[in-house]
């Protein structure tokens, strides 16, 4: 196959590595080299990625949950003038659990072409390694709430779900979450996925009490949790 086609006046939603930089696709690299500008969460993170692959002098727009409507409009105006833009996150697939969705929605509203460039996803990687049965689908609930009351309410609702559930959690709040799971779903098998695709990648499987015992101490690294399907459901 030849190099990726990068038509003008379009937004490319580009998946980037969740840890191991060599997981990026050749198509993603081709697109990042050819676009006129890149929209990202953190310019420092994205610049490190571009530097690693020798992509230089590429204009970067920082776009996050606190970005103004004015900034959104400026980005879209460039696309309407026929320029080519790429949307990336700090890691993984844009539009899943990050602030990029408003840009995609605005492009759709203005009839600007949106092209996905698939690749790494923490959600899919966690499901792949967990052994969950996804034949009837799964639920992705994003980041768990940071406050105890809201988190407990969320977990109680998710405990009623029969399909596998995937959530993101801060390593600093993981043990607190496991305490709640011991009470809310003590017999349900879970899988804590930590530092996926990186040197210290780890998957800890078992009931919440067992997993909590094995995780005592300081937890470091990005964490994704999978609540396995309800047995016999």
Image (cartoon, rainbow, N blue to C red):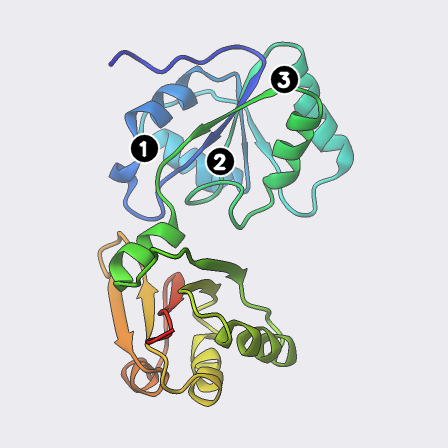
Q: Are marks 3 and 2 in contact (CB under 8 Å)?
A: no
**Crowding near the residue tagged with mark 3, few <14, some 14–19, many ≥20 C-alpha atoms within 10 Å:** many
Task: State the separation of the CA atoms marked 1 and 2.
Answer: 16 Å
Q: Which residue is mark 1?
A: 52
The residue shown at (54%, 10%) is 8
Between tags 1 and 2, which lies in front? 2
Q: Which residue is mark 2?
A: 88
Left or right: where does residue 10 sit relative to residue 163?
Answer: right
The residue shown at (39%, 34%) is 118
The residue shown at (48%, 78%) is 177
Measuring from the top left, give residue 220's x and y in whole percent.
36, 68
Left or right: where does residue 98 sit relative to residue 78?
Answer: left
Residue reaching furthest right? 70
Measuring from the top left, give residue 169's x and y in whole percent.
47, 66
Q: Quadrant of the N terminus?
A: top left
Between tags 3 and 1, which lies in front? 3
Measuring from the top left, give residue 90's x and y in whole percent.
46, 44
Q: Which residue is mark 3?
A: 79
Residue reaching furthest front? 232
* Residue 149 higher or lower than 125, as above or below: below
Q: Are marks 1 and 2 in contact (CB under 8 Å)?
A: no
Look at the numbered disc 1 and give the secondary structure of its residue: helix
**Crowding near the residue tagged with mark 2, few <14, some 14–19, many ≥20 C-alpha atoms within 10 Å:** many
């Amino acid at each position: 196959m030849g190099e990726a086609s990068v038509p003008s006046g379009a937004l490319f939603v580009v998946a980037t590595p969740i840890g191991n930089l060599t997981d990026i696709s050749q198509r993603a690299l081709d697109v990042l080299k050819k676009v006129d500008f890149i929209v990202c969460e953190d310019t420092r993170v994205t610049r490190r990625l571009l530097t690693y692959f020798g992509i230089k002098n590429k204009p970067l727009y920082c776009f996050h949950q606190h970005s103004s409507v004015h900034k959104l409009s400026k980005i879209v105006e460039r696309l309407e003038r026929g320029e080519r833009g790429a949307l990336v996150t700090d890691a993984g697939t844009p539009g899943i659990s990050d602030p990029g969705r408003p840009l995609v929605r605005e492009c759709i509203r203005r009839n600007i072409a949106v092209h996905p460039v698939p690749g790494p996803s923490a959600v899919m990687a966690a499901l792949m390694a967990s052994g969950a049965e996804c034949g009837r689908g799964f639920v992705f609930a994003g980041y768990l709430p940071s406050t105890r009351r809201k988190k407990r309410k969320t977990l109680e609702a998710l405990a009623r779900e029969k399909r596998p559930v995937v959530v993101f959690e801060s390593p600093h709040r993981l043990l607190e979450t496991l305490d709640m799971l011991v009470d809310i779903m003590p017999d349900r098998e879970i899988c804590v996925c930590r530092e996926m695709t990186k040197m210290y990648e780890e998957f800890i499987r078992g009931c919440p009490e067992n997993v909590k015992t094995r995780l005592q101490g300081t937890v470091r690294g990005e964490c994704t949790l999978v609540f396995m399907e309800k047995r016999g459901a």
